[in-house]
Image (cartoon, rainbow, N blue to C red):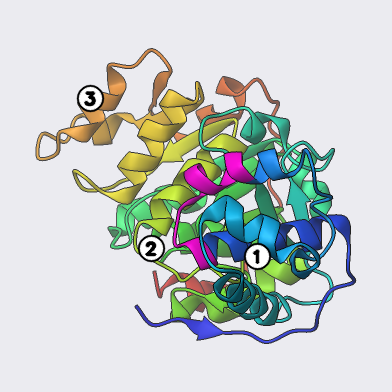
Amino acid sequence: MEIQRTEGLLPPPGRNFQEALNYEALIYASGKGEASIEPLFDQLGHTLDLSIALPSHPHTYADAIGVPPSILLEGYYHAHARFQRLSTGDVIIKRGDALFPQAAAIVPHAPRFLYVRGDLSLLSRRMVCVVGTRNPSDEGKLFARESTLAIGSAGLVVISGLALGIDGVAHLTALSQGIPTVAVIGTSLIESYPTEHANLQARIATEGLLVSRFSPVAKTQKWFFLLRNRLMSSLSIASVLVEDRDGGGAVKHAQYALEQQRTVLLFRHTLENRSILWPRKLAADPLTVIIQKTAEIPNLLGMHPKPPKPRLGKEDKNQLTLF
């Protein structure tokens, strides 16, 4: 998996910055996952100030995770070097903070920290996700674009996963029309994937918001993108699944959304496609809504659409043809 690196400056030190650094150092040094480390970390918080640099109490931390202090300190300084690559404006939000979206905080597997870059106010807005295959049909691209416009016309935020295909169409359409957009990425903020979307990622960081559940220490794995989908669905009030194959990532996203008691919108023509099974499986869930046209989306979400103001420029038209 080719990852593009992006450099930055060390952000101002803060409680969440140091606590997140300590937490990630424990994960890195122990080789254990969040499920094992988080309860240990919480337990340590009863006797230690987690916002103080880990090297102040190396033996206590090392004993907790069962490694020699020298290994722990080596892991800490590795993590510290990675955290220094965050940009000055990047923000680390801890679960329980006022900025951490409550809807995402209460679902199972909610991350302890979110790493964000861009317009933080979007986290308090109602978001609707547009997802689908990385290899969309021309019809799929059209429905993704029209869905994005319908969501934007109701004053909602468009959220997607920055992947090739449907995600890219949704983000580019939103940016071209002045619709706020959030990209939940499957890497840390200091990386970019896919590399074809490095410029799009940078643009969203400037004009919208990037959200990651992965620290700069995390080495990107394929299964990170499923965790990305689970977070993305929890941040959304609903998800529009444009098209996908059986077993695709967008289908898994929809399953997460339904588990989290979120609405999933499917198109009638997709349900009638007998070459795939997933639409009928999802349609069996009472939270799945079948729609005929994208114009139905705002009313189904209890919003009142406003007439769109097209402003698609030549550059954006050219970009949309890439997906």
**Mark before the other along the chain sequence, 3 or 1:** 1
Is any part of residue 186 visible from this angle?
no
- Look at mark 1 in the image and give the residue it sits on: 176
Above or below — where is 281 with respect to 43? above
Secondary structure under the numbered disc 3 in the rendered image: helix
Name the residue that disc number 3 marks.
281
- Percent of width and height locating residue 261: 50, 21
First in sequence: mark 1 or mark 2? 2
In the image, what residue type sits under mark 1?
Answer: Ser
Q: Choose mark 3 or mark 1, whichever is in front.
A: 3
Q: Which mark is residue 165?
A: 2
Secondary structure under the numbered disc 1 in the rendered image: helix
In the foreground, 203 or 186: 186
Q: Residue furthest left?
A: 275
Q: Indicate whether residue 183 is drawn in magenta.
A: no
Q: What residue type is labelled 2?
A: Gly
Q: Which amino acid does label 3 sit on?
A: Lys
- Give the residues in magenta: 29-40
Task: Please say whether residue 37 is one of the residues in the magenta stretch.
Answer: yes
